Amino acid sequence: MDAISPMKNKEELLLGCYQLFNNAFDVDYLFENFLKLIYLNFKNLSKVQVLREIKDINQFTVLYEITSSERSMLAMRIGSVYKNLKELNNETVKLSNIKDDFLNSYDIHSLFAFDLGGSNSYESFLLLCSEDEISLTQDEIDFLLLLLGEFKKCCLRLELLEKSIGDSKRLRLQNELLREQERLKTDFINNISHELRTPLSGILGFSKILSSNKDTAESKEDIAKHIQDSASRLSNLVCDLVQATGSHNSWVVNWELIDINEIAKDSVEEFSLLKKDFKIKYEASSEFPKIKSDSKLIRQVIDNLISNAIKYSVNKKEVAVKLGVNKDKSEVVFSIADSGVGVRKEELSRLFDRFYRSSNSEIKSIPGSGLGLTISKEIVETLGGKITVESELGKGSKFIVILPCT
C-alpha cells in the first residue's frame, strides 16, 4: 500500500480501506494502517487506539495507538473511565467531558468507542479527542460501523491465514527438533560409550597385569592406584548421568550457615595436591560473611568448575579462583578462570545445555560427557543464584557464580 495520507471524501476513504484490506499481509500491519487511515480522515482526534481487556483485574491494555503526541500510551494498563466501556456493553459508547487526571494528562477529554469483540477477550476501537465533546454525526458513525465490519472480516481472514502458516511452521520446527534430538541422542551414545570404555579399559587392563603375576616396571601399589583412579572416574561419570536425568526439583538442599571461603580453599588445596603440574591461584576478600546455603552442593559446583578449568587448560597450566562480595554485601561472587582453549562466542549460549560439547576439534579431543556445566547451573539456580560465562577462543574461559548471602 502507498504511504497513507488524508482522503478527499468518504468514497475515497472507503476505497483506501478496501485497498488496505486486500493488501494486508498480517494482523499488526492491518491494525496499524487502519488506525492511521481513521486518524488522518476524522477531525479533531488526539489519538486512535485499540484496547484489550485484561481479564480478572478490570483493566485494559493499549494494543495499538496512532497519535501526534510524543507521549505514547502503548502497552499501558488503564482502568478508571475505560472500565465503563465493557460495563455499558454496547456496540458504541460515547463519553464526554471526562474528568480523570491520568487521561487528561494524555490530552483525552472525550471519546467514542466501538466494540470490536475479540476471539479471546473484549476489544474496543477508540476515537479520542482533546476537546470536552467529540463530534461525530450519525452519518459518520454509520460509516465507521461499515468500515469496522469489513475490518473485522479482514482480521478474521488474516488470523486464519496466520494460524495455517503457524501450524505449517510449527510442524516444520517439530520435525527439525526431532532430527536434532536424534542427532543429540546418537552423539550422546557415542560420547558416553567412549567415556565409559576408557576407564573400563584401564580397570580391565591393570587387573590383568595384577592377576598375571608377571614382573612389571610398576609396583603393585602403582597398578592399584591406576585401577582406583579409573574406577573413580567411572563412578563420577555414572553420578553425573544419574544427576543429569533429574531436574531442579531433584536437588535436596540442606540449608545452613556456611563459610564458603573455607569450602573454596579446601577445594583448591585438594586440586593443588592432585594436579601438581598446575598452578592454581586462590584469592579471597579479607572479610567474608557466612551465607545460608548448602556446603555439599556448593563444593560440587566449585569442584566441577575447577576440574573443567584444568581439563581445558592444555596450553597454559594456570587456573585462577577468586572469591568476593558485591558492594552492599548482599551477594557472594566467585569466579574460576583458565587460560585454556576457550570457546567461540556463538557457542556460549549452549555451554550449559545437557550433553553439549563444542564443535572445536581441540575441545572434542578432550574427554568429557557434557554434563558437568549443566549440573553446576542447576545447582546454582536451585540455591537461588546464577552462573554466567565469558570466553574467547584460544584465550580461555571464566565462569562467574553469584549467590545470595541470605
Image (cartoon, grey):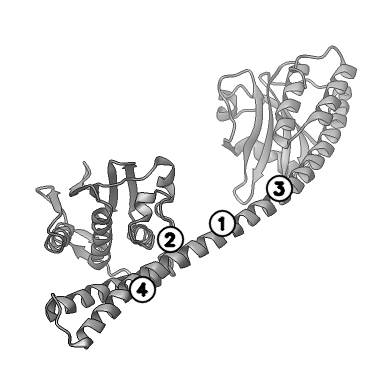
Q: Distance from label 1 to label 2 (Cα)?
A: 13 Å
Q: Secondary structure at mark 4?
A: helix
Please give the residue where the numbered disc 2 appears in the rendered image.
Answer: 355
Which residue is at 13% across, 75% downward? 217
Please give the residue where the numbered disc 1 appears in the rendered image.
Answer: 180
Closer to us: 283 or 207: 207
* Amino acid under disc 3: Gly
* Marks 4 and 2, the one that precedes in the sequence: 4
Q: Distance from label 1 to label 4 (Cα)?
A: 25 Å
Circles 3 and 2: CB atoms closer than 8 Å = no
Closer to us: 339 or 80: 339
Q: Secondary structure at mark 1?
A: helix
- Residue 189 in percent (x, y) is at 47, 67
Residue 174's quadrant in the figure?
A: bottom right
* Marks 1 and 4, the one that precedes in the sequence: 1
Look at the picture and state if 383 lies above or below 42: below
Please give the residue where the numbered disc 4 appears in the rendered image.
Answer: 238
Circles 1 and 3: CB atoms closer than 8 Å = no
Look at the picture and state if 356 lies above or below 328: below
Q: Is residue 131 left or right of residue 189?
A: right
- Residue 5 in percent (x, y) is at 75, 14
Callout 2 environment at 10 Å: few (<14), some (14 to 19), or many (20+)? many
Q: Distance from label 3 to label 4 (Cα)?
A: 42 Å
* Amino acid under disc 4: Val
Circles 1 and 2: CB atoms closer than 8 Å = no
Judge whether residue 341 can be spotted in this image: yes
Please give the residue where the numbered disc 3 appears in the rendered image.
Answer: 166
Callout 4 environment at 10 Å: few (<14), some (14 to 19), or many (20+)? some
